[in-house]
Image (cartoon, rainbow, N blue to C red):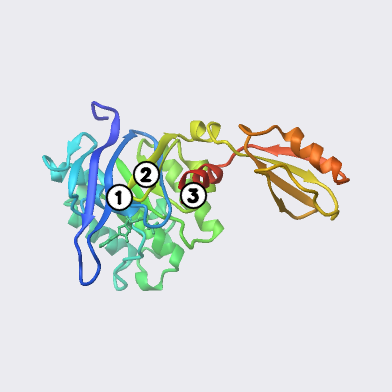
Amino acid sequence: MNETQNAIEITGLRKTYAASGKAPPKEALKGIDLTIPAGSIYGLLGPNGAGKSTTINIMAGLVNKTAGNVVIWGFDQDVNPRNSRAAIGVMPQELNIDPFLSPRASLEVQAGLYGVPRSERWTDELLALVGLSDQAESYSRNLSGGMKRRLLLAKALVHRPQVLVLDEPTAGVDIGLREMLWQNVRRLNELGMTVILTTHYLEEAEQMCDRIAIIDRGEVLVENSTEALLAGADGKTLVIATDDTPLPALPDGVTAERRDAGRVAFSYAPSQMQPDAIIDALRGGGLPIRDIAIEQPRLEDVFVELTRH
Ligand SMILES: Nc1ncnc2c1ncn2[C@@H]1O[C@H](COP(=O)(O)OP(=O)(O)OP(=O)(O)O)[C@@H](O)[C@H]1O
């Protein structure tokens, strides 16, 4: 463990991509501060183009920053580039795998690139960890999309980094494989690895992450524990079971959505009204109420509230 107990410390991080052709320069990061505690599962969330990949690629040493300071596992990137790079492993979004190498050979090549001595390699364990022992000697081009993703996860781990970064690990991945990936991630985290992930699936982030930063247009909008983010959200949902009687006029600020099995969901802001205002309106309109429940805010509510442009 490093002295500060922080896996990552980012201060004043800026990135402006140079102009190319007719495209003007693009300011992708406008001065980002992030502190990621060691041992956490940390979510970096934001809409498309927010700057998530840019941040990750700078951490990984794949993109040069324009300004700011990045410290990984206690190693300043500018002072100790080798150590800071050795402390982080990245599973990229793209399935960039050599089609003619077997998974075993891919992992060996990657270990070579990171200068891992043969005696310290853990290729067989890694293959088992991601469920590719049976495919260890197949051509990677013959792997399914899900198997390729698992191979990418194993590749990110060859040098036993303290920090694992997953860039959209479950994009376009079926439910079974998602479960397996998340189980792997939890296990690695239990073994002491700090995990940073981006995902568009907010439900996954809500379940997996201890802390979350929401970034948008190159700035951090909010950073907190997942619990605190949800507690501070000003949005709840009243759900009733009814029939197909038309809905009456609702108090200002309430939106209704019909769900299956005759249920209707009413979203409201607890700071603005109590649920009895909605119930009174429904009763006034002669709507039968056969069942009733209140749903607590979800990460999606927080996200939409913050990133509504
Ligand atoms: N190589 C590049 N050259 C110029 N502009 C770039 C480059 N890479 C990214 N950008 C721009 O920088 C901004 C941030 O992009 P980035 O890929 O970091 O966002 P993101 O949050 O990862 O988005 P997504 O969710 O779509 O992956 C975007 O406006 C993007 O178009």
- The residue sitting at the top extreme is 3
Residue 308: x %, y % from top left:
49, 49
Q: Assign a secondary structure to mark 1.
A: helix
Give the amino acid at mark 2.
Ile
The residue singled out by tag 2 in the image is 196
Left/right placement of residue 183 relative to residue 31 reads right
Dot 1: within a 10 Å radius of its alpha carbon, few (fewer than 14), some, or many (20 or more) residues? many
- Circle count: 3
> Where does ligand 1 appear, by image quarter?
bottom left
Distance, label 3 to label 2, CA atoms, is 25 Å
Q: Quadrant of residue 71?
A: top left
Dot 2: within a 10 Å radius of its alpha carbon, few (fewer than 14), some, or many (20 or more) residues? many
Residue nearer the viewer, 106 or 232 = 232
Distance, label 2 to label 1, CA atoms, is 9 Å
Dot 3: within a 10 Å radius of its alpha carbon, few (fewer than 14), some, or many (20 or more) residues? few
The disc placed on residue 205 is none
Give the amino acid at mark 3.
Arg
The residue singled out by tag 3 in the image is 308
Q: Assign a secondary structure to mark 3.
A: loop
Distance, label 1 to label 3, CA atoms, is 24 Å
Give the amino acid at mark 1.
Ile
- Name the quarter where the N terminus is drawn: top left
The residue singled out by tag 1 in the image is 56
Residue 26: x %, y % from top left:
26, 58
Comes first in the chain, label 3 or label 2: 2
**Decide: marks 2, 1 in contact (CB < 8 A)?**
yes
Residue drawn 41% across and 69% down? 143
Comes first in the chain, label 2 or label 1: 1
